[in-house]
Amino acid sequence: MATLTFLGIESSCDDSAAAVVRHGPDGAPKVLASVVQGQVALHADFGGVVPEIAARAHAERLDHCVEQALAEAGVTLADLDGIAVTSGPGLIGGVLSGVMLAKGLAAGSGKPLLGVNHLAGHALTPRLTDGLPFPYLMLLVSGGHCQFLIADGVDRFHRIGGTIDDAPGEAFDKTAKLLGLPQPGGPAVEREAAQGDPARFAFPRPLLDRPGCDLSFSGLKTALLRARDALVAEQGGITVQDRRDLCAGFQAAVADVLAEKTRRALLAYLALNPAAPALAVAGGVAANAAIRAGLETVSAQQGVRFLAPPLRLCTDNAAMIAWAGIERFRAGLGGDADLVARPRWPL
Ligand code: KG4
Ligand code: ZN
């Protein structure tokens, strides 16, 4: 097995990222550099990611990210064995910025160009960080995604459930906005929840009454809005403690739902794959301690190994894209000369 060094480029949402990953025959893959430039401040006034602003920022920043990643890794384009770029799914303007830059770099350097599905990048991360063998169950929980995947191979993912409306990170972000907390909402809500009473407000546990692994989070957001408005009507506003209790109740509901649906997904997965079971998570919401604890508990109850990559590789980054490129190249899936950007691209 030859040593491979890949550049990865990611620009599908609001992070401009470039990374260099190397994988040799003797040992674990190494992230030689991983540069991520977030855009939270650019979108802060709008309460969500504005596609046009994101696309322009990616176009302005991506080449600097690439230069910095190559410099930090101590390599030049000539040292690379390939260039991998997120070619979907995501905000099309951003994806196009990355794809065009990658095409230019590949054409200029004569290196192979590989298109990577952003979700596959997340789903293959536990192999980069822990060398996890296939198959394993993956829970992807971020601001844009929420799904259970059985990862069976580099290009073989089987979806066994997911959200039917919002992603949990989106619900955290909207909750923060409704309560006047800063973005991204997840960490802010978690901080407030730490000092709140999760039992004071009765939040629903959506879809637990229905079989299967599908999830729903939009009702939780509505419940929070109602509870807040009731407090405002009653007392003319909400107190610091009201806010903490609302956050605690909301977070407990999300954690409960994710834990129970994960338990069901594990049972479905174990029925198909009884040997060497493992659950891996990815996505920013996996940073939440209460949610992570719930997932750890259900994994332990089923005798399943639980894996959560370090946060910088759990959230959007380009190392996962470079790694997915290496995996695809090794599997003979490389060489996308006619690569196109795809806004929608289910795994
Ligand atoms: O994976 P990610 O960086 O980007 C994508 O959405 O693809 O995830 C960001 C999301 C945001 O919605 C953010 O609020 C949420 O992850 N998040 C959290 C926490 N940290 C980040 N949600 C709950 N608790 C946290 N501690
Ligand atoms: Zn992502």
Image: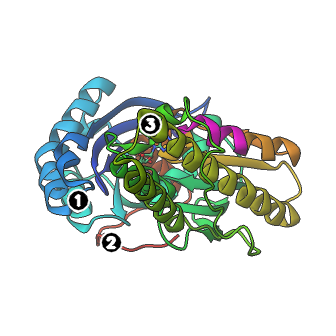
Q: Do the residues labelled 2 and 1 touch (CB within 8 Å)?
A: no
Identity, as a three-letter code, of the amino acid under mark 2: Pro
Secondary structure beneath dot 1 equals helix
Q: Give percent across and percent down for residue 50.
A: 20, 59
| Mark 3 or 2, nearer chain start | 3
- Residue 5 falls in which quadrant of the image? top left
Is the CB of mark 3 within 8 Å of ligand 1?
A: yes
- Tell me the residue that label 2 is attached to: 343
Q: Which residue is drawn at 38% across and 56% down?
A: 233
Residue 317 at least partly seen: no
Residue 161 highlighted magenta (yes or no): no
| Mark 2 or 1, nearer chain start | 1
Q: Which mark is residue 29?
A: none
Q: Give percent across and percent down for residue 236.
A: 34, 48
In this image, 260 relative to 274: left or right?
left
Residue 293 position (above or below residue 219): above
Mark 1 and mark 3: Cα distance apart in space: 25 Å
Residue 61 or residue 48, whichever sits in front: 48
Secondary structure beneath dot 3 equals helix
- Tell me the residue that label 1 is attached to: 94
**Main SS type for the magenta part?**
helix
Residue interval drawn in magenta: 287-294
In this image, 290 relative to 166: left or right?
right
Neighbour tally class for label 2: few under 14, some 14-19, many 20 plus, Cα within 10 Å? some
Q: Residue at x 10, y 47 (%)?
A: 60
- Tell me the residue that label 3 is attached to: 187
Residue 335 position (above or below residue 131): below
For the image, the number of numbered tags is 3
Q: Residue at x 59, y 59 (%)?
A: 154
Secondary structure beneath dot 2 equals loop
In this image, 224 relative to 296: left or right?
left
